[in-house]
Amino acid sequence: MDKVEVSINETQEQSGSTTSTIDQQNASSIDPSTPWSEKPDNLKNIIVEDDESPEDEIKRKKKEKTARILTFVGLQIALFLAALDGTIVSTALPSIGSDFNQMSIVSWVATAYILTFDAFQPLFSKFSDIFGRKIILMVGIGLFLFGSVLCGAAKNMIMLIISRAIAGIGAAGIFSMVFIIFSDLVPLEQRGSYQGVVNAVFALSSVFGPLIGGLFTDYVTWRWNFYINLPIGAIALVMLVLFLRLPTPHGKLTEKLKRVDYAGTVIVLAFATLFLLALNFGGQTFPWKSAAVIVPLILSFLLVILLVYVEKHFAKEPLMPPRLFKNRSVVSVLLTNWFFGMTFFSAVYYLPVYFQVVRNDSAMWSGIRLIPMQMVMCVLSTFAGIFISKIGVYKPLIMFGMVMVTLWIGLISLFKEDTPFSQIYGITVIGGAGLGCLFSSCIIALQASVEPKDIAVVTGLGNFSRILGGALGVAISSTVLNSHLTENLPNVLPVELANAVIQSSEFVNHGLPAEYLASTLRVYVEGLQLIWYVFIPMAGLGTISSCFVKHHSVRKPKQNKDEIPEDDATAEVIVIDTPMKDNVVKTEIEIDESKKLETA
């Protein structure tokens, strides 16, 4: 068994209790970015009084257990809100576009959120290594709540889009920190079960997002889709401020600021912004051949090249360490995440369009239609996490998940005006099974493929790739559908009616003369089918990339008693007391019998 040399420097008697301190040089030699669950056992815990009575110990353990539970609940609430905000507007978009009479740019309500949510994932992940997890999480929650207030009070579409971008920044801090904090607190071999529960909460938010969004839109106002975040977010904030306890990185603020990769940060933000701007301009605001689309695309490509050069040659602590991209398994999972995100987000945003426009469902009912898929996703996510913890493998789950997603997208393309809902529910269940397996297994695969010091960064990269793929997917879907409607509606409708349908999808079932309804729905169905035809090969590419994921065991090798070194067999466990800034963390330290502390 690996051991870390620990020297006991002194014995102090304070208030009737004996305490000891760890050699600071040994403690400081451990990389501060290493997850707490991966630290050497002899450095994890900090002070316990030697003369603690049994009654005091019982009380302390009860308090610690309560704090752990409340921390877990607080993290889950925060994650639920961030994920909920990504889907709650999906059923409200038609009403928002009609309310502001700007249906042509309503997709930006989703895209602005996804853009900042994605761009800030790797930034917050790296910043948490420098400044600490808790402070980044608090900043994220604060920005998210501030953005939600602005969204609810938006007076026009531009204000709403900007407010969604602010909320997306905050959600990025929440989302990245929750997954990283769990990786800090839970050992890799147990992480699958916890990640399964975390991803189940994410799945539940996807269940309730469209449903809650539909309820507010139909019976109150779409603005409450954003106001609902305030009371729930405040509860999570208070719980985490009071009960979340994590080590704070040492060092002065000026020293920490010097560690920030400013060049990499600016390049990543510029790349994400230009890339997504080009995608959303193309075919909608400007023609694809226009300079407004081509120039941002070229610049974003050049920025990727610049980022690689800067991170390799200049950055002292790279935002995206080049060594990670030499890891075949990491690259394979990131590509799988990319294609997975493209298909998932497109389905979440455009299946409600099918239900509301083609099947004349209300916003609420379009959310209800997705419940079978989301419930299966929730169950399979939990199962996949438990499977990984018990069996220790994840690659089969990733491959199975992508195969199911590919099949799901292919079957969605068969939806028509009169497809029985029993068939629709069965097909969405197939998608839920694939999605549930992917959410749990991809994160574990990334974390198992790298050294502990890279876990925060690679977790952020995993989220970044999936969400950037999702933003690309939504932009492509919007372009494909709008281009198809613009080209084909004038063939079946008078120009005035065709423009009205393009500007507001609600006009189809609430304003269009009956004699034009059937032909208009046919054009809509064909446009939606084109979306799925685009994503069938994308899902197939994700399946292929999943085959190249390498397996790294997440289980600790069992050690026979005969293999334990003789000097380790006499090791005793003692508990020591060492101060750490703003924290009290417990640990056990193994020392040899010959090095036991002599007390007076």
Image (cartoon, rainbow, N blue to C red):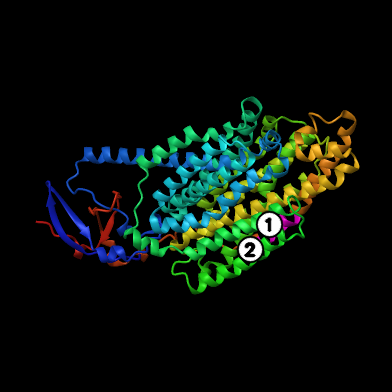
Q: Does residue 57 lie above or below 247 as drawn?
A: above
Q: Quarter holding the N terminus?
A: bottom left
Residue 478, image x and y in percent?
73, 47
Residue 341, image x and y in percent?
64, 52
> SS class of the residue under badge 1?
helix
Mark 1 and mark 2 lie on one chain; the one further toward the N terminus is 1
CB atoms of marks 1 and 2 within 8 Å: yes
Marks 1/2: CA distance? 9 Å
Q: Does residue 224 lie above or below 291 as drawn?
A: above
Note whether residue 561 is visible: no
Q: Which residue is mark 2?
A: 300
Magenta-drawn segment: 536-545
Looking at the picture, which amino acid does disc 2 mark?
Ser
Note whether residue 239 is visible: yes
Observer-nearest of 299 and 372 = 299
Residue 558, image x and y in percent?
43, 59
Q: Residue furthest top?
A: 219
Q: Which residue is mark 1?
A: 278
The verdict on residue 213 being magenta is no
Q: Quarter holding the C terminus?
A: bottom left
Circle 2 Cα neighbour tier, 10 Å, few/some/many (<14 / 14–19 / ≥20): many
Circle 1 Cα neighbour tier, 10 Å, few/some/many (<14 / 14–19 / ≥20): many
Q: Does residue 531 lie above or below 493 as drawn?
A: below
